[in-house]
Amino acid sequence: QQQVKQSPQSLIVQKGGISIINCAYENTAFDYFPWYQQFPGKGPALLIAIRPDVSEKKEGRFTISFNKSAKQFSLHIMDSQPGDSATYFCAARISGAGSYQLTFGKGTKLSVIP
Amino acid sequence: NAGVTQTPKFQVLKTGQSMTLQCAQDMNHNSMYWYRQDPGMGLRLIYYSASEGTTDKGEVPNGYNVSRLNKREFSLRLESAAPSQTSVYFCAISPWSSYEQYFGPGTRLTVT
């Protein structure tokens, strides 16, 4: 089973607030959990990633929290800015037979209002 | 999207027509991928090529074929387009074993 469930589908946050996006997975064979950011009309781009043996990773205003026992991970965007308005995808990597694949969540459309 | 180019950017097809979407990279990465993106469905893997000379099916391969022409190029072919294939198609590349994939700008395909 390679499903990654993401919520919420959309999120509206005021400027300066905290945006939180959650993901859950079932397959314990996943070995990396990246987050991608996509602006309208563009392809997704890697934002931040975490390994399952780490509980938290922070890069600037973006933090991933990882709960291995619950099979959940989340993206926190601190001091959210209008420029953060985009669609965010969580993903999980699986490897096998000499190849690596990402399974993506369905995405969260974030709107940061002034 | 530097390093990954996709052609065409837009295409309108009639049901039953065929076409090939082209993807080329200049980053010398081993792995290449084709995804489709539909509203509310996220990114779904159609086919991938772990390295030159190999291709494998992803989650939604039906109705598509691929060719890894060389290390730089990976094409996606629709033999007989159907309205259900209306989507935005993304090509992505990655270094071997990396979790980071670099996406192209996408091709918006409409099948009427």
Image (spheres, coloured by chain):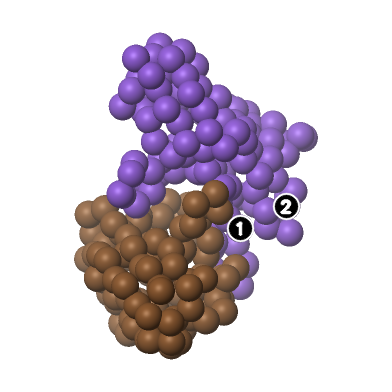
Chain colours: A purple, B brown
**Element on which disc 2 rests:** loop
Q: Which residue type carries mark 2?
A: Asn
In this rendered view, identify the residue nearer to me: A28 or B77.
B77
Vertical comparison of A76 with A7: above or below: above
Return the x and y of residue A73 as percentages of the image width and height: 63, 34
Residue placed furthest toward the top: A16
Residue A112 is at least partly visible in this image: yes
Return the x and y of residue A86 as percentages of the image width and height: 39, 36
Assess disc 2: are there few (<14), some (14-19) or many (≥20) residues with their C-alpha within 10 Å of its C-alpha.
some
The answer to whether tags 2 and 1 share a subunit is yes
> What residue appears at the point 49 percent right and 57 percent down from the top-left corner?
B38
| Residue at mark 2 to residue at mark 1: CA–CA distance | 9 Å
Q: Are marks 2 and 1 in contact (CB under 8 Å)?
A: yes
Q: Quadrant of the C terminus of chain A?
A: top left
**Which quadrant of the figure has residue B25?**
bottom left
> What residue does disc 1 label?
A94
Left or right: B2 with respect to A16? left
Q: Chain of mark 2?
A: A
Vertical comparison of B100 with A66: above or below: below
Vertical comparison of A6 with B50: above or below: above
Q: Which residue type carries mark 1?
A: Ile
> What residue appears at the point 52 percent right and 43 percent down from the top-left corner?
A107
In this rendered view, identify the residue nearer to me: A41 or B90.
A41
Q: Earlier in the sequence, mark 2 or mark 1?
A: 2
Return the x and y of residue B95 as percentages of the image width and height: 39, 60
> What residue does disc 2 label?
A27
**Element on which disc 1 rests:** strand
Q: Chain of mark 1?
A: A
In this rendered view, identify the residue nearer to me: A83 or A57.
A83
